[in-house]
Image: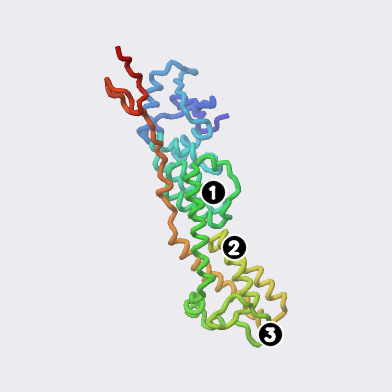
């Protein structure tokens, strides 16, 4: 059932959606929104379909898409800007916005796509690729770093090619490899972290408290406490699969709870503040490294199939390879 304001008595034509819903519209608003609607208005003048005294013009869009487009064209006193709550509406509304030259609506759709990226990055990447939105596709690819290298299947995966999926997985893999350097060379802690923290990194060095020290990492030849080493080791393993700043921040809570459960007053002192600051510093290093990895836009270029045609046959000559018939000697 169509909703106001598309039942208005001053409507001068009816737009019929592809699924048979009629919208009584005021053509003045449409022509002011975009000159692309002029052709529809011209069709109305020639239409032989009449309902009441209004001409009917069928359009390709379904009622949901048409409703969104028309609301965007109407003044705010009659219709508020349409919400784009459903991700399934992104592509059809964007295509309609381009078809009717509604640039502001296209911008609104792109913003709606960006707002969904944090929760549904792979779906947004596929939609952005389908719509040839390279900026949004690159941003969505960055958000996929918060998820596993092998993502869960989403309906929109059918919108992209194998080449495009390969580009995304390659980008994800390269980011995962890039951040592994943070676990091999700890100079970013022994030098850079000292600048940000007046006490340096001494709070993670095994000392007089008697708590167990770790064996994998060394900070200027000093062994850090085991709980910190475990945090780093777990973070580095997780970063290979999810090379994102969110990965290192997510491990802070478990580490703080573990230290507090140990009952060591020395380790517990300012543990939440210290771990939070360190993880934030760590996360910035992760972002710096992944920002240097580019999504391979060459792989994302549209695929142009090569048509193989038979070579033109020269008159009077048989095709190469002796396939032609030989003339019999008389």
Residue 80 seen in the figure = no
Viewer-nearest residue: 123 or 172: 172
| Disc 2 + disc 3, Cβ < 8 Å | no
Residue 210 disc label: 3
Where is residue 83 drawn, in percent x and y? 52, 43
Q: Which residue is mark 2?
A: 238
**Mark closest to the chain's N terminus, 3 or 1:** 1
Q: Which mark is residue 122?
A: 1
Numbered disc in front, either 3 or 1: 3
Q: In which quadrant is the N terminus drawn?
A: top right
Vertical placement of residue 317 versus 228, above or below: above
Vertical position of residue 318 compared to residue 213: above or below: above
Coordinates of residue 290 in the picture (x, y in percent): 47, 61
Helix, strand or loop status at disc 1: helix
Q: Earlier in the sequence, mark 2 or mark 3?
A: 3
The mark closer to the camera, 1 or 2, is 2
Q: Judge from the rendering whether residue 317 lies leftward or rightward of residue 201; answer left or right.
A: left
Badge 3: few (under 14), some or many (20 or more) residues near its Cα, within 10 Å? few
Indicate the position of residue 261 as horizontal and vertical percent values.
Answer: 72, 75
Q: Which mark is residue 33?
A: none
Q: Quadrant of the C terminus?
A: top left
Task: Let me know if residue 330 appears in the view.
Answer: yes
Q: Earlier in the sequence, mark 1 or mark 2?
A: 1
């Amino acid at each position: 059932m169509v909703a106001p304001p598309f039942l208005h008595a001053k409507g001068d034509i009816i737009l019929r959606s592809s699924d048979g819903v009629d919208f009584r519209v005021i053509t003045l608003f449409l022509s002011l929104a975009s000159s692309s609607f002029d052709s529809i208005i011209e069709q109305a003048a020639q239409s032989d379909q009449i309902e009441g005294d209004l001409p009917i013009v069928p359009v390709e869009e379904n009622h949901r898409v048409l409703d969104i487009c028309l609301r965007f064209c109407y003044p705010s006193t009659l219709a508020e800007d349409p919400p784009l709550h459903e991700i399934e509406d992104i592509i059809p509304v964007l295509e309609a916005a381009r078809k009717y030259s509604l640039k502001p609506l296209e911008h609104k759709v792109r913003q709606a796509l960006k707002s969904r990226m944090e929760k549904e990055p792979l779906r947004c990447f596929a939609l952005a690729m389908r719509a040839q939105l390279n900026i949004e596709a690159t941003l969505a690819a960055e958000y996929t770093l918060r998820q596993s290298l092998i993502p869960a299947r989403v309906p929109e995966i059918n919108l992209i090619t194998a080449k495009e999926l390969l580009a995304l997985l390659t980008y994800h893999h390269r980011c995962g490899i890039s951040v592994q350097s943070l676990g091999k060379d700890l100079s970013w802690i022994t030098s850079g972290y000292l600048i940000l923290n007046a006490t340096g990194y001494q709070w993670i060095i095994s000392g007089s408290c008697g708590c167990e020290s770790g064996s994998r990492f060394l900070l200027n030849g000093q062994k850090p406490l085991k709980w910190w080493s475990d945090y780093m080791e777990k973070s580095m393993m997780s970063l290979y699969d999810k090379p994102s700043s969110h990965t290192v921040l997510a491990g802070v809570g478990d580490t703080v709870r573990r230290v507090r459960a140990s009952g060591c007053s020395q380790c517990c002192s300012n543990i939440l503040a210290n771990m939070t600051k360190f993880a934030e510093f760590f996360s910035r290093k992760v972002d710096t490294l992944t920002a240097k990895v580019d999504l391979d836009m060459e792989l994302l270029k549209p695929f142009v199939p090569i048509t193989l045609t038979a070579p033109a046959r020269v008159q009077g000559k048989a095709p190469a390879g002796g396939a032609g018939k030989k003339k019999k000697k008389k």
